[in-house]
Image: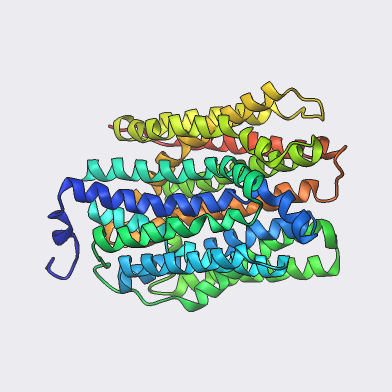
Amino acid sequence: MTTTTTPPAQAALSARRRWTVLAVCCLSMFLVGLDTTIVNVGLPAIGRGLDVGTRSLEWTVDAYTIVLAGLLISSGALADRFGRRRVFQCGLLVFGAASLVCAAAPSVDALVAARAVQGVGASMLSPVALAIVVNVMTDPKERAQAIGVWASVFGLSMALGPVTGGALVGVFGWRSLFWVNAPVIVIALVLSAVFVPESRGPRARRLDVPGQVLLTAVIGVWVGVLIEGPRIGWTSPAALVAYAVASAATVGFVGVEARRDEPLMDLRLFRSPVFSGAFLGAVAVFVALNVTLLLNTLYLQQGRGFTPLAAGVATLPMALGATVCAPWSGRLVGRVGPRLPLSLAGGFITAGGLCLIGLDRHTGVPLLLFAYFLIGIGFGFANAPITNTAVSGLPPARAGVAGAITSTARQLGSALGIAIAGGLVAHTGPVGLAQASRPGWFLVAGCGLLLLLMARASRSKG
Protein backbone atom coordinates (compact mmCIF):
# COMPACT_ATOMS: atom_id res chain seq x y z
CA MET A 1 0.00 0.00 0.00
CA THR A 2 2.97 2.31 0.45
CA THR A 3 4.54 1.64 -2.95
CA THR A 4 2.82 4.65 -4.51
CA THR A 5 4.13 7.13 -1.97
CA THR A 6 7.55 8.69 -1.60
CA PRO A 7 8.47 8.29 2.08
CA PRO A 8 9.94 4.75 1.82
CA ALA A 9 12.49 5.86 -0.74
CA GLN A 10 13.26 9.02 1.17
CA ALA A 11 13.79 7.12 4.40
CA ALA A 12 16.85 5.49 2.79
CA LEU A 13 18.64 8.81 2.51
CA SER A 14 21.67 9.12 4.76
CA ALA A 15 21.65 11.62 7.59
CA ARG A 16 24.22 13.72 5.75
CA ARG A 17 22.06 13.79 2.62
CA ARG A 18 18.94 14.70 4.59
CA TRP A 19 20.60 17.64 6.28
CA THR A 20 22.11 18.72 2.96
CA VAL A 21 18.59 18.81 1.52
CA LEU A 22 17.56 20.96 4.50
CA ALA A 23 20.46 23.32 3.81
CA VAL A 24 19.44 23.72 0.16
CA CYS A 25 15.83 24.44 1.13
CA CYS A 26 16.97 26.89 3.78
CA LEU A 27 19.06 28.72 1.18
CA SER A 28 15.98 29.33 -0.95
CA MET A 29 13.92 30.31 2.08
CA PHE A 30 16.60 32.73 3.17
CA LEU A 31 16.23 34.42 -0.21
CA VAL A 32 12.42 34.60 0.02
CA GLY A 33 12.53 36.00 3.54
CA LEU A 34 15.29 38.45 2.68
CA ASP A 35 13.29 39.87 -0.23
CA THR A 36 10.31 40.39 2.05
CA THR A 37 12.23 42.97 4.11
CA ILE A 38 15.38 43.95 2.20
CA VAL A 39 13.45 46.50 0.15
CA ASN A 40 12.21 48.37 3.25
CA VAL A 41 15.43 50.22 3.96
CA GLY A 42 15.80 51.15 0.28
CA LEU A 43 12.33 52.69 -0.05
CA PRO A 44 13.43 56.34 0.34
CA ALA A 45 16.18 55.79 -2.27
CA ILE A 46 13.69 54.10 -4.63
CA GLY A 47 11.29 56.99 -4.09
CA ARG A 48 13.97 59.51 -5.04
CA GLY A 49 15.16 57.45 -8.00
CA LEU A 50 11.71 56.92 -9.48
CA ASP A 51 10.17 60.17 -8.16
CA VAL A 52 7.29 58.60 -6.22
CA GLY A 53 5.77 59.00 -2.75
CA THR A 54 5.04 56.75 0.20
CA ARG A 55 1.87 55.20 -1.22
CA SER A 56 3.63 53.89 -4.33
CA LEU A 57 6.53 52.74 -2.19
CA GLU A 58 4.14 50.65 -0.11
CA TRP A 59 3.02 48.88 -3.27
CA THR A 60 6.60 47.95 -4.14
CA VAL A 61 6.64 45.91 -0.95
CA ASP A 62 3.04 44.69 -0.81
CA ALA A 63 2.78 43.70 -4.49
CA TYR A 64 5.24 40.95 -3.57
CA THR A 65 3.63 39.89 -0.32
CA ILE A 66 0.01 40.00 -1.58
CA VAL A 67 0.75 37.74 -4.55
CA LEU A 68 2.91 35.50 -2.39
CA ALA A 69 0.22 35.14 0.25
CA GLY A 70 -2.51 34.55 -2.32
CA LEU A 71 -0.74 31.79 -4.25
CA LEU A 72 1.06 29.86 -1.52
CA ILE A 73 -1.59 27.21 -0.95
CA SER A 74 -2.12 26.49 -4.65
CA SER A 75 1.63 26.26 -5.16
CA GLY A 76 1.86 23.74 -2.34
CA ALA A 77 -0.91 21.67 -3.93
CA LEU A 78 0.77 21.88 -7.35
CA ALA A 79 4.01 20.64 -5.81
CA ASP A 80 2.25 17.69 -4.19
CA ARG A 81 0.71 16.86 -7.58
CA PHE A 82 3.47 17.48 -10.14
CA GLY A 83 6.60 17.05 -8.06
CA ARG A 84 8.08 19.18 -5.33
CA ARG A 85 11.58 19.51 -6.77
CA ARG A 86 10.18 20.41 -10.19
CA VAL A 87 7.95 23.16 -8.81
CA PHE A 88 10.75 24.32 -6.51
CA GLN A 89 13.15 24.76 -9.43
CA CYS A 90 10.47 26.48 -11.52
CA GLY A 91 9.96 28.91 -8.64
CA LEU A 92 13.68 29.66 -8.54
CA LEU A 93 13.72 30.47 -12.25
CA VAL A 94 10.66 32.75 -12.07
CA PHE A 95 11.97 34.49 -8.96
CA GLY A 96 15.38 35.04 -10.54
CA ALA A 97 14.02 36.39 -13.83
CA ALA A 98 11.65 38.78 -12.04
CA SER A 99 14.51 39.99 -9.84
CA LEU A 100 16.47 41.02 -12.93
CA VAL A 101 13.45 42.91 -14.28
CA CYS A 102 13.08 44.68 -10.90
CA ALA A 103 16.71 45.76 -11.08
CA ALA A 104 16.21 47.29 -14.51
CA ALA A 105 12.73 48.79 -13.89
CA PRO A 106 12.40 52.24 -15.54
CA SER A 107 9.30 53.27 -13.55
CA VAL A 108 7.46 52.45 -10.36
CA ASP A 109 4.69 50.72 -12.31
CA ALA A 110 7.21 48.38 -13.91
CA LEU A 111 8.82 47.77 -10.54
CA VAL A 112 5.50 46.93 -8.87
CA ALA A 113 4.56 44.55 -11.71
CA ALA A 114 7.93 42.79 -11.51
CA ARG A 115 7.63 42.53 -7.74
CA ALA A 116 4.27 40.80 -8.23
CA VAL A 117 5.93 38.27 -10.56
CA GLN A 118 8.63 37.81 -7.93
CA GLY A 119 5.80 36.87 -5.56
CA VAL A 120 4.63 34.21 -8.02
CA GLY A 121 8.09 32.64 -7.99
CA ALA A 122 8.41 32.93 -4.23
CA SER A 123 5.07 31.16 -3.76
CA MET A 124 6.63 28.09 -5.40
CA LEU A 125 9.54 28.15 -2.96
CA SER A 126 8.15 28.76 0.52
CA PRO A 127 5.63 25.91 1.01
CA VAL A 128 7.48 23.53 -1.27
CA ALA A 129 10.74 23.90 0.64
CA LEU A 130 9.00 22.97 3.88
CA ALA A 131 7.20 20.06 2.19
CA ILE A 132 10.52 18.71 0.92
CA VAL A 133 12.01 18.94 4.39
CA VAL A 134 9.02 17.31 6.08
CA ASN A 135 9.04 14.39 3.64
CA VAL A 136 12.79 13.82 3.78
CA MET A 137 12.93 13.95 7.59
CA THR A 138 10.86 10.87 8.42
CA ASP A 139 11.86 10.59 12.08
CA PRO A 140 9.50 12.76 14.20
CA LYS A 141 12.25 14.08 16.45
CA GLU A 142 14.56 14.88 13.53
CA ARG A 143 11.65 16.45 11.68
CA ALA A 144 10.88 18.73 14.61
CA GLN A 145 14.52 19.82 14.73
CA ALA A 146 14.54 20.44 10.98
CA ILE A 147 11.35 22.51 11.14
CA GLY A 148 12.94 24.54 13.91
CA VAL A 149 16.02 25.18 11.76
CA TRP A 150 13.85 26.03 8.75
CA ALA A 151 11.73 28.49 10.71
CA SER A 152 14.84 29.99 12.29
CA VAL A 153 16.51 30.59 8.93
CA PHE A 154 13.37 32.17 7.50
CA GLY A 155 12.99 34.45 10.50
CA LEU A 156 16.67 35.33 10.49
CA SER A 157 16.55 36.24 6.80
CA MET A 158 13.74 38.72 7.42
CA ALA A 159 15.60 40.26 10.34
CA LEU A 160 18.81 40.60 8.30
CA GLY A 161 17.02 42.14 5.32
CA PRO A 162 17.30 45.78 6.46
CA VAL A 163 20.98 45.44 7.35
CA THR A 164 21.81 43.84 4.02
CA GLY A 165 19.63 46.30 2.15
CA GLY A 166 21.21 49.31 3.84
CA ALA A 167 24.70 48.13 2.94
CA LEU A 168 23.77 47.45 -0.69
CA VAL A 169 21.93 50.76 -1.18
CA GLY A 170 24.71 52.70 0.49
CA VAL A 171 27.43 51.23 -1.73
CA PHE A 172 25.78 50.20 -5.01
CA GLY A 173 22.39 51.97 -5.13
CA TRP A 174 18.85 50.63 -4.80
CA ARG A 175 18.92 48.46 -7.94
CA SER A 176 21.48 46.21 -6.26
CA LEU A 177 18.71 45.06 -3.91
CA PHE A 178 17.51 42.90 -6.79
CA TRP A 179 20.73 42.09 -8.68
CA VAL A 180 22.02 40.36 -5.56
CA ASN A 181 19.48 37.55 -6.00
CA ALA A 182 21.00 36.24 -9.23
CA PRO A 183 24.06 34.37 -7.86
CA VAL A 184 22.03 32.86 -5.01
CA ILE A 185 19.43 31.58 -7.50
CA VAL A 186 22.13 29.93 -9.62
CA ILE A 187 23.67 28.21 -6.59
CA ALA A 188 20.27 26.99 -5.37
CA LEU A 189 19.37 25.61 -8.81
CA VAL A 190 22.60 23.61 -9.03
CA LEU A 191 22.37 22.26 -5.49
CA SER A 192 18.70 21.30 -5.83
CA ALA A 193 19.44 19.36 -9.02
CA VAL A 194 22.25 17.46 -7.32
CA PHE A 195 20.91 16.81 -3.81
CA VAL A 196 17.12 17.23 -3.60
CA PRO A 197 15.10 14.08 -4.40
CA GLU A 198 11.84 14.34 -6.28
CA SER A 199 8.69 13.68 -4.26
CA ARG A 200 4.94 13.98 -4.60
CA GLY A 201 1.92 13.74 -2.38
CA PRO A 202 0.40 10.24 -2.16
CA ARG A 203 -2.75 11.47 -3.91
CA ALA A 204 -3.14 14.26 -6.45
CA ARG A 205 -5.59 16.98 -5.46
CA ARG A 206 -7.68 18.94 -7.93
CA LEU A 207 -6.93 22.63 -8.14
CA ASP A 208 -9.55 24.88 -6.59
CA VAL A 209 -9.63 27.69 -9.14
CA PRO A 210 -12.68 29.55 -7.70
CA GLY A 211 -11.18 29.37 -4.22
CA GLN A 212 -7.82 30.61 -5.51
CA VAL A 213 -9.38 33.60 -7.29
CA LEU A 214 -11.49 34.52 -4.27
CA LEU A 215 -8.60 34.17 -1.80
CA THR A 216 -6.40 36.44 -3.92
CA ALA A 217 -9.24 38.96 -4.11
CA VAL A 218 -9.81 38.86 -0.35
CA ILE A 219 -6.16 39.53 0.47
CA GLY A 220 -5.53 41.99 -2.34
CA VAL A 221 -8.62 44.16 -1.86
CA TRP A 222 -8.44 44.37 1.93
CA VAL A 223 -4.73 45.26 1.88
CA GLY A 224 -5.30 47.62 -1.04
CA VAL A 225 -7.93 49.49 0.94
CA LEU A 226 -5.50 49.94 3.82
CA ILE A 227 -2.86 51.33 1.47
CA GLU A 228 -5.13 53.60 -0.57
CA GLY A 229 -7.48 54.62 2.25
CA PRO A 230 -5.50 57.68 3.39
CA ARG A 231 -5.43 58.97 -0.21
CA ILE A 232 -9.01 58.29 -1.36
CA GLY A 233 -10.67 58.81 2.04
CA TRP A 234 -12.01 56.07 4.29
CA THR A 235 -15.65 56.96 3.59
CA SER A 236 -15.31 57.94 -0.07
CA PRO A 237 -17.44 56.16 -2.72
CA ALA A 238 -14.37 54.29 -3.97
CA ALA A 239 -13.59 53.07 -0.46
CA LEU A 240 -17.18 51.97 0.13
CA VAL A 241 -17.15 50.00 -3.12
CA ALA A 242 -13.87 48.37 -2.07
CA TYR A 243 -15.35 47.39 1.31
CA ALA A 244 -18.32 45.81 -0.45
CA VAL A 245 -16.11 43.91 -2.91
CA ALA A 246 -13.79 42.68 -0.16
CA SER A 247 -16.70 41.60 2.04
CA ALA A 248 -18.42 39.79 -0.84
CA ALA A 249 -15.17 38.03 -1.75
CA THR A 250 -14.69 36.96 1.86
CA VAL A 251 -18.23 35.56 2.14
CA GLY A 252 -17.88 33.93 -1.27
CA PHE A 253 -14.58 32.31 -0.33
CA VAL A 254 -16.01 30.81 2.86
CA GLY A 255 -19.08 29.57 0.99
CA VAL A 256 -17.11 28.01 -1.88
CA GLU A 257 -14.60 26.33 0.40
CA ALA A 258 -17.31 24.89 2.65
CA ARG A 259 -18.96 23.12 -0.31
CA ARG A 260 -15.90 21.67 -2.05
CA ASP A 261 -14.69 18.13 -1.47
CA GLU A 262 -11.08 19.26 -1.91
CA PRO A 263 -10.98 22.93 -0.94
CA LEU A 264 -8.02 25.22 -1.37
CA MET A 265 -8.10 25.86 2.38
CA ASP A 266 -9.90 23.36 4.58
CA LEU A 267 -11.80 25.74 6.85
CA ARG A 268 -12.64 22.90 9.23
CA LEU A 269 -9.05 23.11 10.44
CA PHE A 270 -9.85 26.44 12.03
CA ARG A 271 -12.29 24.74 14.37
CA SER A 272 -9.17 23.62 16.24
CA PRO A 273 -8.12 26.33 18.72
CA VAL A 274 -4.51 25.17 18.39
CA PHE A 275 -4.43 25.54 14.62
CA SER A 276 -6.36 28.83 14.63
CA GLY A 277 -4.05 30.17 17.32
CA ALA A 278 -0.98 29.26 15.29
CA PHE A 279 -2.39 31.00 12.22
CA LEU A 280 -3.30 34.17 14.12
CA GLY A 281 0.01 34.08 15.96
CA ALA A 282 1.93 33.97 12.68
CA VAL A 283 -0.07 36.93 11.37
CA ALA A 284 0.60 38.90 14.56
CA VAL A 285 4.34 38.21 14.56
CA PHE A 286 4.77 39.42 11.01
CA VAL A 287 2.53 42.44 11.48
CA ALA A 288 4.77 43.45 14.38
CA LEU A 289 7.97 42.82 12.43
CA ASN A 290 6.93 44.74 9.33
CA VAL A 291 5.44 47.66 11.24
CA THR A 292 8.75 47.89 13.08
CA LEU A 293 10.88 47.72 9.94
CA LEU A 294 8.92 50.26 7.89
CA LEU A 295 8.50 52.76 10.73
CA ASN A 296 12.20 52.40 11.53
CA THR A 297 13.18 53.07 7.92
CA LEU A 298 10.98 56.15 7.49
CA TYR A 299 11.65 57.57 10.96
CA LEU A 300 15.43 57.28 10.78
CA GLN A 301 15.93 58.31 7.14
CA GLN A 302 13.19 60.91 6.65
CA GLY A 303 12.69 62.05 10.24
CA ARG A 304 16.28 62.12 11.42
CA GLY A 305 18.37 62.17 8.25
CA PHE A 306 20.12 58.80 8.65
CA THR A 307 21.72 57.25 5.56
CA PRO A 308 20.30 53.92 4.29
CA LEU A 309 23.36 52.14 5.67
CA ALA A 310 22.98 53.75 9.10
CA ALA A 311 19.26 52.93 9.18
CA GLY A 312 20.04 49.34 8.27
CA VAL A 313 22.78 49.07 10.88
CA ALA A 314 20.31 50.30 13.49
CA THR A 315 18.41 47.03 13.04
CA LEU A 316 21.48 44.93 13.84
CA PRO A 317 20.31 44.41 17.44
CA MET A 318 17.08 43.00 16.03
CA ALA A 319 19.00 40.62 13.77
CA LEU A 320 21.25 39.66 16.69
CA GLY A 321 18.29 38.86 18.92
CA ALA A 322 16.68 36.75 16.20
CA THR A 323 19.96 34.96 15.39
CA VAL A 324 20.62 33.95 18.98
CA CYS A 325 17.09 33.06 19.99
CA ALA A 326 15.67 31.36 16.88
CA PRO A 327 17.70 28.13 17.17
CA TRP A 328 17.25 28.18 20.95
CA SER A 329 13.51 28.37 20.39
CA GLY A 330 13.60 25.32 18.12
CA ARG A 331 15.36 23.30 20.80
CA LEU A 332 12.89 24.47 23.46
CA VAL A 333 9.94 23.38 21.32
CA GLY A 334 11.45 19.91 20.98
CA ARG A 335 12.10 19.60 24.74
CA VAL A 336 9.22 21.35 26.51
CA GLY A 337 6.66 22.26 23.86
CA PRO A 338 5.52 25.64 22.53
CA ARG A 339 4.32 27.39 25.69
CA LEU A 340 7.65 28.69 27.01
CA PRO A 341 9.07 30.02 23.71
CA LEU A 342 5.71 31.61 22.85
CA SER A 343 5.58 33.28 26.25
CA LEU A 344 9.09 34.63 25.77
CA ALA A 345 8.21 35.83 22.26
CA GLY A 346 5.10 37.64 23.43
CA GLY A 347 6.81 39.21 26.43
CA PHE A 348 9.78 40.57 24.49
CA ILE A 349 7.72 41.90 21.56
CA THR A 350 5.34 43.62 23.96
CA ALA A 351 8.23 45.20 25.88
CA GLY A 352 9.89 46.38 22.67
CA GLY A 353 6.73 48.06 21.41
CA LEU A 354 6.07 49.75 24.75
CA CYS A 355 9.59 51.21 24.74
CA LEU A 356 8.71 53.31 21.68
CA ILE A 357 5.17 54.53 22.35
CA GLY A 358 6.61 57.93 23.38
CA LEU A 359 8.87 58.25 20.32
CA ASP A 360 9.85 61.77 19.24
CA ARG A 361 12.50 63.38 17.03
CA HIS A 362 15.04 63.39 19.85
CA THR A 363 14.59 59.89 21.26
CA GLY A 364 17.99 58.52 22.17
CA VAL A 365 19.58 56.01 19.85
CA PRO A 366 20.36 53.62 22.76
CA LEU A 367 16.64 53.33 23.52
CA LEU A 368 15.90 52.65 19.85
CA LEU A 369 18.54 49.94 19.68
CA PHE A 370 17.33 48.39 22.93
CA ALA A 371 13.73 48.29 21.68
CA TYR A 372 14.78 46.71 18.38
CA PHE A 373 16.83 44.14 20.32
CA LEU A 374 13.79 43.19 22.40
CA ILE A 375 11.61 42.84 19.31
CA GLY A 376 14.30 40.76 17.60
CA ILE A 377 14.47 38.39 20.58
CA GLY A 378 10.69 38.02 20.50
CA PHE A 379 10.71 37.41 16.76
CA GLY A 380 13.41 34.77 17.15
CA PHE A 381 11.46 32.88 19.80
CA ALA A 382 8.16 33.03 17.89
CA ASN A 383 8.74 31.28 14.58
CA ALA A 384 9.65 27.73 15.57
CA PRO A 385 6.70 27.05 17.93
CA ILE A 386 4.20 28.64 15.53
CA THR A 387 5.50 26.72 12.52
CA ASN A 388 5.67 23.41 14.35
CA THR A 389 2.17 23.84 15.77
CA ALA A 390 0.63 24.74 12.40
CA VAL A 391 2.33 21.92 10.51
CA SER A 392 1.40 19.42 13.21
CA GLY A 393 -2.23 20.43 12.76
CA LEU A 394 -2.44 18.75 9.34
CA PRO A 395 -1.89 15.15 8.15
CA PRO A 396 1.70 14.44 7.00
CA ALA A 397 0.43 13.66 3.49
CA ARG A 398 -0.68 17.28 3.18
CA ALA A 399 2.81 18.62 3.84
CA GLY A 400 2.74 21.06 0.93
CA VAL A 401 -0.58 22.53 2.03
CA ALA A 402 0.58 22.60 5.66
CA GLY A 403 3.60 24.68 4.79
CA ALA A 404 1.52 26.88 2.52
CA ILE A 405 -1.03 27.77 5.20
CA THR A 406 1.72 28.67 7.64
CA SER A 407 3.49 30.81 5.06
CA THR A 408 0.22 32.43 3.98
CA ALA A 409 -0.28 33.65 7.53
CA ARG A 410 3.24 35.11 7.57
CA GLN A 411 2.87 36.93 4.29
CA LEU A 412 -0.61 38.16 5.17
CA GLY A 413 0.88 39.62 8.33
CA SER A 414 3.70 41.20 6.31
CA ALA A 415 1.28 42.81 3.87
CA LEU A 416 -0.96 44.10 6.64
CA GLY A 417 1.99 45.44 8.61
CA ILE A 418 3.33 47.42 5.64
CA ALA A 419 -0.11 48.77 4.77
CA ILE A 420 -0.91 49.83 8.33
CA ALA A 421 2.48 51.41 9.01
CA GLY A 422 2.48 53.23 5.69
CA GLY A 423 -1.03 54.51 6.29
CA LEU A 424 0.00 56.01 9.61
CA VAL A 425 2.73 58.20 8.12
CA ALA A 426 1.76 58.51 4.44
CA HIS A 427 0.83 62.20 4.64
CA THR A 428 3.16 63.25 7.44
CA GLY A 429 6.26 65.38 7.04
CA PRO A 430 9.62 64.76 8.73
CA VAL A 431 8.72 66.88 11.79
CA GLY A 432 5.53 65.00 12.67
CA LEU A 433 6.62 61.55 11.59
CA ALA A 434 7.64 60.33 15.05
CA GLN A 435 4.35 61.29 16.66
CA ALA A 436 2.32 59.87 13.76
CA SER A 437 4.08 56.52 14.17
CA ARG A 438 3.16 56.08 17.85
CA PRO A 439 -0.05 54.06 17.18
CA GLY A 440 2.17 51.65 15.29
CA TRP A 441 4.18 50.92 18.41
CA PHE A 442 0.97 50.30 20.38
CA LEU A 443 0.07 47.81 17.64
CA VAL A 444 3.43 46.06 18.00
CA ALA A 445 2.86 45.74 21.74
CA GLY A 446 -0.66 44.43 21.09
CA CYS A 447 0.72 41.74 18.80
CA GLY A 448 3.01 40.66 21.62
CA LEU A 449 0.06 40.43 24.00
CA LEU A 450 -1.76 38.21 21.50
CA LEU A 451 1.20 35.81 21.54
CA LEU A 452 1.07 35.77 25.33
CA LEU A 453 -2.60 34.76 25.18
CA MET A 454 -1.75 32.10 22.61
CA ALA A 455 0.98 30.75 24.89
CA ARG A 456 -1.41 30.62 27.81
CA ALA A 457 -3.83 28.53 25.73
CA SER A 458 -1.16 26.13 24.51
CA ARG A 459 -0.10 22.94 26.21
CA SER A 460 3.37 22.11 27.40
CA LYS A 461 4.96 18.91 26.15
CA GLY A 462 4.25 15.77 28.08
Q: Is residue 442 above or below residue 122?
A: above
Label count reads 0
Q: Quadrant of the C terminus?
A: top left
Q: Measured from the top left, where is residue 7 in percent x and y?
A: 18, 60
Whether residue 133 can be seen here: yes
Foreground residue among 176 and 281: 176
Q: Measured from the top left, where is residue 343 in percent x and y?
A: 48, 29
355 left or right, relative to 451? right
Q: Measured from the top left, where is residue 180 in percent x and y?
A: 52, 54
How is the structure coloured here? rainbow
Residue at 50% over, 50% down: 33
Residue at 55% over, 74% down: 213
Whether residue 71 can be seen here: no
Q: Is residue 259 above or below residue 305?
A: below
Residue at 20% over, 51% down: 17
Q: Quadrant of the N terminus?
A: bottom left
Occupied quadrant, residue 411:
bottom right
458 left or right, relative to 425? left
Q: Is residue 70 above or below residue 381?
A: below
Q: Measured from the top left, where is residue 245 in percent x and y?
A: 69, 71
Judged from this view, the residue extending furthest toward the front is 171
Q: Is residue 252 above or below residue 277?
A: below
Foreground residue among 457 and 223: 223
326 left or right, relative to 291? left
Occupied quadrant, residue 141:
top left
Residue at 55% over, 28% down: 348
141 left or right, relative to 292? left
